[in-house]
Image (cartoon, helix red, strand yellow):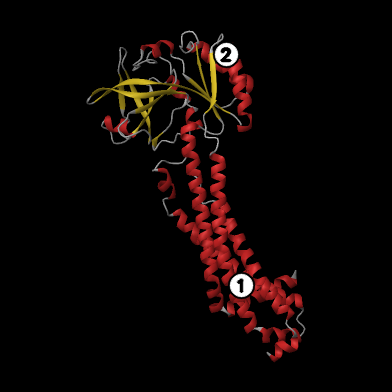
Amino acid sequence: MIGVLGALSEAWDEVRVHKSRVVLSLVGVFLAVFAMTSVTAIGQLAAQVQQETAERTGGRPATIGVSAYDPATGMPPDSEAWDAAVADLTDRYGITTSASISYGEGLYRMPGGTQRAQTMRVSPSYGELHRKEPIEGRWLREGDRTSLSPALVVNEAFLEALGVADLSSRPTVVLGGPTPVRATIVGVLREGYGSDLLAYRVDRSGGAWGDAGTVDPMQAMYGGPSTLEVWVNADQADEVMETVRRDLGLALGGAQVDPYRMDAEGVEKSLAVLRLAIRGAGIVVLVLGGLGVLNIGLVTVRQRIREIGVRRSFGATSGRVFAAVMLESVCATALAGVVAVGAAIVLVRNLPVVAWFNDGIPLADAPGFPVAAAIEGMIAATAVGALAGLLPAIIAVRAKVIDAIRF
């Protein structure tokens, strides 16, 4: 242990004595580690953005959509029968995350007159399945089912049509139709196309206003969701789809049940390839920086060959000489790695990386600086120092004492 500490101390003294040479040799390593760490971190953030963007549309892996209808009439099943069948299915198989979804239009009394808006009636768990992250306010929750005022989550176009800038004034809107009721806007999403109005409500929220604002009378009559979504393990998706088709069909008295995979199955593989490509680019940059350290190390050993010969003549062992030359390179590159990783953290934290790739939509699982990128940067810097110092150390050990002194 004392020998190792002595070798490290000696290597550090050499780094301090030869500051100019060390700085010149480490410029390439610093830039390489800085570029590798920054690119890896930005790449991981971009991959997270892409993953969440895909999951906002198709759901998390694996999300299975289920639709059911009467093959004779084409109508959805009765709402009470549907709810009972779905509850029995999720309880029996331990499905912890599922959501009911129905699509339709709603009537909303805006300052310029009553307007129609696309309205989705969803379970609160739909937000978890599709990573719904409001830019203001909150998403729907279970307590909204019994609220005295219907809770709405709308898009920015809806809020603009209402003539409201933000949620600070606790804005409300009247749901039109035969039984108008005032709803409260609790959240704002950044989604939809152009000026299209979009609103989310809790599925069958309850109360006298449950069907308020419904445009389609048949939707108000049946009230059942057109789609069920369940979140299961990806490797069990096929088995679950077959089970859902069989069990729900029997529970609904022979209804036609069509399960299908909603999430993008190839996203994980695409992201894995992206991460691999980013890591490969970082390694190439790092190798180029390591070559610069190696070249300067070889020149330095040639310049210090007389010093090494004198040390060997006074009893320095081959191992001690090898360790001194090797650890000098390792200490120097490790120091460069620490500085480079610190600079990369400062850069990435101050860049609006998420906004670049995500159009200002906040991430549901917003990552900090990827720790893996910092660790990789430090390991890579140390490894480059070891590899770059290996050849000069071997040359120093193989030098004969008499030849070194004559040199």
Q: CA distance from mark 1 to mark 2?
A: 70 Å
- On screen, residue 332 versus residue 321, left or right, reads left
Q: Which residue is mark 1?
A: 294
Task: Please give the name of the residue rendered at 56% of the width and 71% of the height, measured from the top-left corner.
Answer: 292
Q: Residue at x 50, y 60 (%)?
A: 35
In the picture shown, does residue 30 fall above or below 135? below
Tell whether 49 sits left or right of 272. Answer: left
Q: In front here: 42 or 207?
A: 42
Instruction: Identify which residue, 125 or 293, lies in the foreground.
Output: 293
Q: Quadrant of the N terminus?
A: bottom right
N-term-proximal mark, 1 vs 2:
2
Proximity of marks 1 and 2: CB atoms separated by less than 8 Å: no
Circle 2: residue type: Gly
Q: Is residue 67 left or right of residue 304?
A: left
Residue 237, x across and y down, in percent:
60, 28
Where in the figure is residue 137, as x and y percent of width and height?
Answer: 39, 34
The answer to whether residue 398 shows anywhere in this view is yes
**Residue 260 rendering spot, x and y as whole percentages:** 54, 25
Residue extending farthest left? 112
Crowd band around label 2 with a 10 angstrom C-alpha radius: few (<14), some (14–19), many (20+): some
Q: Nearer the viewer, residue 307 or 152?
A: 307
Q: Amino acid at mark 1?
A: Leu
List the residue tagged with mark 2: 249
In this rendering, the answer to whether 186 lies above or below 33 is above
Q: From what the image shows, is residue 21 above or below residue 89? A: below
- Is the residue marked by circle 1 packed among few (<14), some (14-19), or many (20+) residues within 10 Å? many
Residue 132 lies in quadrant? top left
Residue closest to the far front: 72
* Residue sitting nearer the eye, 142 or 35: 35
Find numbered disc 1 in the image and state the secondary structure of the residue it sits on. helix
Residue 364 shows in this picture:
no
Q: Secondary structure at mark 2?
A: helix
